[in-house]
Amino acid sequence: MKATDLLKKQHKEVKALFKKVEKTENARERRQLMEQISQQLELHTQIEEEMFYPAVRESGKKAEEMIDEAYEEHHVVKLVLKELPQVDPEDERFQAKMTVLSELVEHHVEEEEGEMFKIAEKALGKERLTELGDEMAQRAGAPRGGRRAA
């Protein structure tokens, strides 16, 4: 699986979790969903920062600027994630923080999928993106082909 396809798949999974949180009234379920979102985002940002971004950074000035911005967006997401466990899922602030987090992630995803991934496809090519995707999947705990290990 190409690295860009793996990252898009992860983006969709997190987006689905955000939708579930919006629809869930039960505090315990909200907390569990928040923990799943947190775990997935931590893993996702780690493989992007350690593997994908360094590979794409060399693609030129535009890629370099986008990656610098992506690191800063990751930083803001991590700050919100750090605060979430201290907020009661029944408090209105919980939903407000989840909304802000969701919007941050959505903006980040739009920029990656809309621009950065196109640069990566062109600069790295299908073969290198597939190799990188396999390496990223292994790091994420999934066997080749993108399925998560049990």
Image: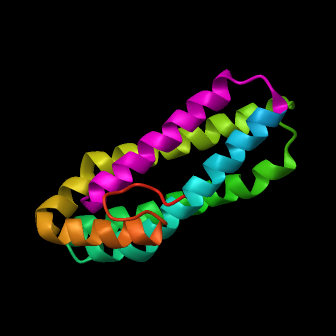
How many labels sit on residues? 0
Q: Horizontal placement of 102 versus 28: left or right?
A: left
- The residue that appears at 18% across and 72% down in the rendered structure is 128
Residue 110 against residue 146 in the figure, above or below? above
Q: Is residue 20 above or below residue 46?
A: above
Quick one: 85 or 6, which is closer to the camera? 6
Q: Position of residue 29 (x, y in %)?
A: 76, 34
Q: Nearer the viewer, residue 92 or 38?
A: 38
102 with respect to 55 (left or right)? right
**Quadrant containing the C terminus in the rendered view:** bottom right
Residue toward you, 89 or 102? 89
- The residue sitting at 69% across, 54% down in the picture is 81
Q: Nearer the viewer, residue 1 or 88?
A: 1
Segment colored magenta: 1-27
Q: Is residue 128 left or right of residue 106?
A: left
Looking at the image, which residue is at 65% across and 26% down?
22
Q: Is residue 3 magenta?
A: yes
Q: Is residue 28 visible?
A: yes
Q: Tell me the chief SS of the magenta region.
A: helix
Q: Position of residue 82 (x, y in %)?
A: 74, 58
Residue 67, position as x, y percentages in the image: 37, 66
Name the residue located 21 percent from the left edge and 63 percent from the top edge.
120
Indicate yes or no whether the magenta region holds residue 77. Answer: no
Which colour scheme appears in the figure?
Answer: rainbow
101 shown above or below 70: above
Q: Is residue 64 visible?
A: no
